[in-house]
Amino acid sequence: MFERIKEDVGCVFERDPAARHALEVLTCYPGVHAVLFYHLSHALWVANLKWLARFVAHVARFFTGIEIHPGATIGRRFFIDHGMGVVIGETAEIGDDCTLYHGVTLGGTSWEKGKRHPTLGKGVVIGAGAKVLGPITVGDQARIGSNAVVVRDVEAGTTVVGVPGKVVQAPVTERFRRREETARKLGFAAYGQVRGMPDPVSQALDSLLDHARDVEREITELKQKLAEINPTPRARVVDADD
């Protein structure tokens, strides 16, 4: 239990540059308080003390403004930043290392019992005010933009924005990985560039990076062929007068 608390506090420093020290996080972060309350209420829920679990969750909501149903399943290092207005439904499932901002709803679209809330993979980030509704799946490392409304599955590694949610950044492809690798070797970082950006400057940069990689591959092949032709370089003849 103490290990989980340590992880919950530690992840805040990784994702919030405003965090200064552990005491501040433990006393001034409602998102951390809500997660600590959740651990207690969920343990009571699993122990079949349903009413007591709901009461603890209700108290947590009163103090933090964050409503987490004790029946939800939440992974490790879960961080709620700011937190006010966050709602997480009973059958929601949240993977490790996920981050939610204020006003996020993981809600249902049906009054039927059973699975009716979203499932988030690992490392998912959901922006302020976004609504993720229904028994859908959001893949690992996906990003949901602020105020987006998502009612369909989201592939891993994609970015979704708007109402209804639309993909604006496709999953990482092998070609994109190669371009990033080439850019790093050249000491160039296109931080404003996203995958699939319909921009002529971005397309020109992509072409240059592809060309640089091709040239690098050709140079490597030429070096290999030269090494095969002359595997040992000639020793320099030293003149007696030297």
Image (cartoon, grey):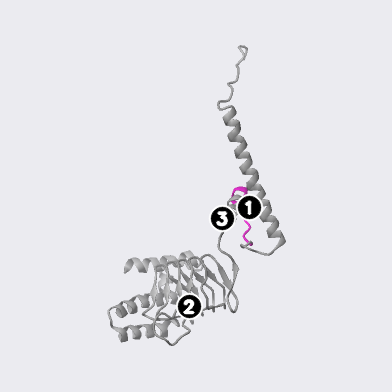
Q: At 57% from the left edge and 73% from the top edge, which residue is drawn?
A: 145
Judged by its main secondary structure, the magenta piece is loop
Instruction: Give the labeled residue for mark 3.
Output: 174
Residue type, numbered disc 3: Glu
Instruction: Give the labeled residue for mark 2.
Output: 83
Residue type, numbered disc 1: Phe
> Bounds of the magenta span?
184-192
Residue 100 placement (x, y as % from top left)? 49, 73
Q: At 64% from the left edge and 46% from the top edge, which residue is drawn?
A: 214
Residue type, numbered disc 2: Gly
The span from disc 2 to disc 1 (Cα, nearest Å) is 36 Å
Q: Mark number for residue 188?
A: 1
Q: Quadrant of residue 70?
A: bottom left
> Which one is in front in this view, the residue at disc 3 or the one at disc 1?
3
In magenta stretch: residue 197? no
- In the rendered view, does 20 fall on the left or right side of 5? right
- In the rendered view, does 36 fall on the left or right side of 217? left
Q: Secondary structure at mark 2?
A: loop
